[in-house]
Image: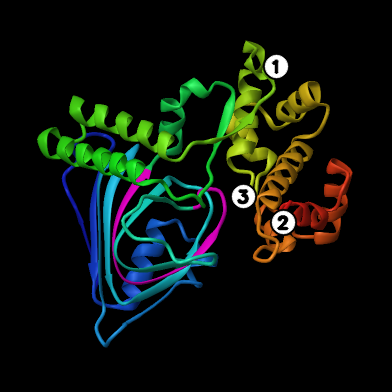
Amino acid sequence: MSEQVTSPSEGPEAIRFEFTGHRPDDAVRDLAGIYGAGSEVVGRWVAHPSDGAFDHRYTAVGDAEVTIRRAQLHGVLQGVVPAGGDYVVLWIGAGAVETEQRTLPHDVPLLLPPDQEFAFRTADHDLRIVHLDRAFVRRVAGSHGDAALRFDAHGEPDPESARRWQGALTALARALRVGGTESVAWQGAKVAAAEVFLDVFPPLLDDLPAVLGQPRNARLRAAVEYVHDHASEPVTISDLSAASGLSVRSVQESFRRVFDVSPLTYLRQVRLDRVRAELLDADPQARAVGDVARRWGFAHLGRFSAAYAERFGEYPKETLRRSVG
């Protein structure tokens, strides 16, 4: 039976938990829950023994802004992780971890895709994991000004970057041992880890219009940043209202006033821009236009293709063919 162990609170934001178990069904329930897999996704998670035995252990310690974690599994696990949530950096110490695109290398920090759903399969793994809250990373990255943060999850850091990331993890663990999550040492180690994260995985920046820097547009800017941060997810005007503190009607009026389009048209433009960026960087032999379009929220490929051609003056297949040039 799976067991969760929670420590006494070390502060209002302290996090400490552990899941252990010896049954595949418990592993699916525990691990899918940690990574936000709702009922429609958890059915795509499967676990089974690899050699007759099975067990899993998952621990986490930190606070709501940064947690350091370890995941150990004797067996096989596969599933689908939804988009959104924390930025998650993985370090594979043992075992095999595969995504749809590749087998992930050992002993190097890897950023899991933060803005799109992805499937994985893993066997007999031992993983070191760091979760970084998006809002916290944004605050640390304040020098990026009017840019919404996006990241390329396909790159592999060089050995020097790997050493720096390991150093950040060591400092985080030491700060927890010495003073816990309320200590000055922990607060400093968190900021340092986020700074290393931003150096190891440099953000891809969406330049937001300068008009959003005007005080009168502060709430609209919050809505626009929400669009850029959640472009691959279902986004409603109610979501933008909640993110900005504006009424639904004010959200609509503000987008019309500043951009002369509706909020959902603006969202579609951002998604089209993301599709184009991915197609220009894609291998035509390994990537299909339909897969990229669906990942960015375009379910009807005919309408998508027409909208793409209207925005960029060429069809998406032409863009994909040009990516090898």
Helix, strand or loop at disc 1? helix
Circle 2 is placed at which residue position? Answer: 293
Helix, strand or loop at disc 3? loop
Q: Amino acid at mark 2?
A: Ala
Mark 2 is surrounded, within 10 Å at the Cα level, by few (under 14), some (14 to 19) or many (20 or more) other residues, namely many
Q: Residue at x 19, y 28 (%)?
A: 185
Q: Which residues are magenta?
A: 113-131
Q: Residue at x 25, y 27 (%)?
A: 188
Circle 1 is placed at which residue position? Answer: 211
Circle 3 is placed at which residue position? Answer: 233
Vertical comparison of 315 with 231: above or below = below
Q: Is residue 69 left or right of residue 203?
A: left
Q: Position of residue 304 (x, y in %)?
A: 81, 54
Label whose residue precedes the other's in the sequence (1 or 3): 1
Give the foreground label among 1 and 3. Answer: 1
State whether residue 63 appears in this view: no
Res. 181 mark: none
Q: Position of residue 141 (x, y in %)?
A: 45, 27
Q: CA distance from mark 2 to mark 3?
A: 12 Å
